[in-house]
């Protein structure tokens, strides 16, 4: 550290009380912004995991324009090639990124039982593959697993709303009527093997049948392939790799943000609202820093005049105040990081429990958790240090513009 930097560092201790209050403001601003970002990132990360883990997955593959207008006729072309490509990717260098993939048949149908009829959303799935993409294997099932059913009819799981309206019980028959992909009438009897999910869950109006049975019933191929990644942040990158490998013009590859577009837009809007809060906190910090530094500058104006009179280079004079604030902000932010880390970790492990769970699109959230990331620890540090140093340039400019005579005349 050269002599000029040593002088700037020592100046911090000349007004210890003022330096303490300024440092306390910087420390508090960093801790508040760090905790706010950690809670925001953690909350949305939890919500994204809930959405993607419930049924969406991180990436979905469809026939072109299927998301805009779903139809039983819009099946994925080159299904075998796509499934083989995904299998190779999941067992190659991307095996630490791609956790699994699940082909699906999706279509609407009318369900009939006990002289009651209602529309249902039919999902044809492979339970083993589906469990690698979503929490299908962890969802509560009131009944028997398909593998344990011995019957000539195809077993199905029904959602709670379907069970209630059609007054279904375990072991009863259910008739489905729909249209096949080839234009034929699809109708058949099924065996109710159980109820899946919860009464408030996203599966309450859905009906699940084995994948091959769904293909036969709808005379169709696969409508959707869902892909699960290790983390949602890899979605755009893996989507780019899939676009390069799967070059068929009629294939549409979408990330979870495109599939759940409304949720994603709401999340981004809420993030922008949180950014306004961060800015307000930082402005308050900067006002406190500006006030303290400006008072210090005015009190030491005669000293600056004397330094100019003895020939101190203008650059050193100008940089004196910002360098003092830089040292003070580095120390304050460092102390703030040591404080914020255990606080963020506590909110990561324990979180904030809601008195009443919040339901979003059929998914219940009972607590808010933080997430310790580089954005919650590094970004607040850079912003606080940068803004504090930038604000200190105002008093530095005032002191720099004063002539030696005017500065020496200052009281």
Image (cartoon, grey):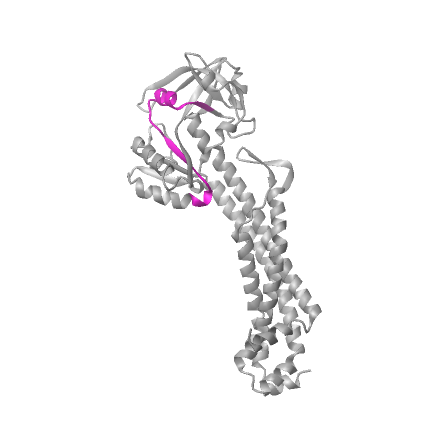
Say if the magenta span includes residue 209.
yes
Q: Residue at x 44, y 17 (%)?
A: 155
User: Quick one: 395 or 316, which is closer to the camera?
Assistant: 316
User: Could you tell me which quadrant the C terminus lies in?
Assistant: bottom right
Q: Residue furthest right?
A: 17
Residue 179 visible:
no
Rendered position, 327 above or below 192:
below
Residue 69, by quadrant, is top left
Q: Which percent across, then down, holds residue 37?
A: 56, 51
User: Quick one: 11 or 56, which is closer to the camera?
Assistant: 11
Rendered position, 341 above or below 199:
below
Residue 366, by quadrant, is top right
Q: Which percent across, then down, holds residue 123?
A: 43, 26
Q: Residue at x 57, y 77 (%)?
A: 4
Q: Which percent across, then down, holds residue 110?
A: 43, 20
Magenta residues (range): 207-234
Q: Residue furthest front?
A: 1
User: Quick one: 25 or 69, which is closer to the camera?
Assistant: 25
Q: How many marks?
A: 0
Say if the magenta span includes residue 202.
no
Residue 385 visible:
yes
Q: Which percent across, then down, holds residue 301?
A: 64, 80
Q: Residue at x 68, y 65 (%)?
A: 21
Residue 65, by quadrant, is top left
User: Quick one: 20 or 179, which is closer to the camera?
Assistant: 20
Q: Residue at x 55, y 26 (%)?
A: 198
User: Could you tell me which quadrant the N terminus lies in?
Assistant: bottom right
């Amino acid at each position: 550290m050269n002599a000029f930097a040593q002088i700037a560092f020592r100046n911090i201790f000349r007004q210890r009380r003022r330096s303490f209050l300024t440092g306390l403001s910087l420390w508090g601003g960093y801790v508040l912004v760090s905790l706010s970002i950690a809670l925001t990132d953690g909350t949305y990360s939890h919500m994204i995991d809930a959405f993607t883990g419930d049924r969406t997955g991180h990436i979905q593959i469809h026939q072109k324009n299927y998301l805009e207008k779903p139809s039983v006729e819009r099946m994925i072309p080159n299904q075998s090639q796509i499934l083989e490509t995904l299998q190779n990717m999941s067992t190659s260098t991307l095996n630490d990124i791609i956790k699994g993939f699940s082909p699906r048949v999706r279509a609407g149908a009318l369900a009939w039982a006990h002289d009651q009829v209602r529309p249902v959303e039919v999902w044809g799935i492979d339970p083993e593959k589906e469990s690698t993409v979503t929490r299908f294997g962890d969802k509560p099932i009131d009944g028997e697993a398909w593998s344990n059913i011995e019957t000539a009819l195809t077993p199905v799981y029904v959602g709670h709303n379907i069970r209630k309206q059609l007054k279904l019980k375990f072991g009863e028959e259910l008739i489905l009527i729909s249209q096949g992909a080839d234009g034929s009438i699809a109708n058949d009897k099924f065996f109710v093997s159980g109820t899946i999910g919860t009464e408030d869950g996203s599966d309450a109006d859905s009906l699940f049948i084995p994948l091959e049975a769904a293909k036969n019933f709808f005379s169709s191929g696969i409508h959707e392939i869902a892909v699960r990644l290790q983390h949602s942040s890899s979605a755009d990158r893996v989507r780019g790799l899939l676009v390069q490998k799967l070059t068929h013009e009629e294939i549409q590859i979408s990330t979870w943000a495109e599939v759940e577009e409304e949720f994603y837009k709401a999340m981004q809007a809420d993030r922008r609202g949180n950014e306004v809060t961060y800015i307000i906190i930082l402005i308050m910090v900067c006002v406190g820093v500006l006030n303290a530094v400006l008072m210090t500058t005015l009190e030491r104006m005669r000293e600056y005049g004397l330094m100019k009179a003895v020939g101190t280079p203008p650059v050193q004079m100008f940089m004196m105040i910002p360098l003092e604030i830089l040292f003070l902000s580095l120390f304050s932010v460092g102390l703030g990081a040591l404080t914020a880390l255990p606080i963020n970790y506590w909110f990561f492990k324990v979180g904030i429990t809601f008195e009443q769970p919040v339901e979003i699109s059929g998914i219940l959230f009972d607590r808010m958790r933080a997430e310790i990331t580089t954005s919650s620890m590094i970004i607040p540090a850079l912003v606080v240090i940068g803004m504090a140093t930038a604000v200190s340039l105002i008093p530095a400019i005032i002191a720099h513009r004063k002539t030696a005579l005017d500065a020496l005349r200052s009281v």
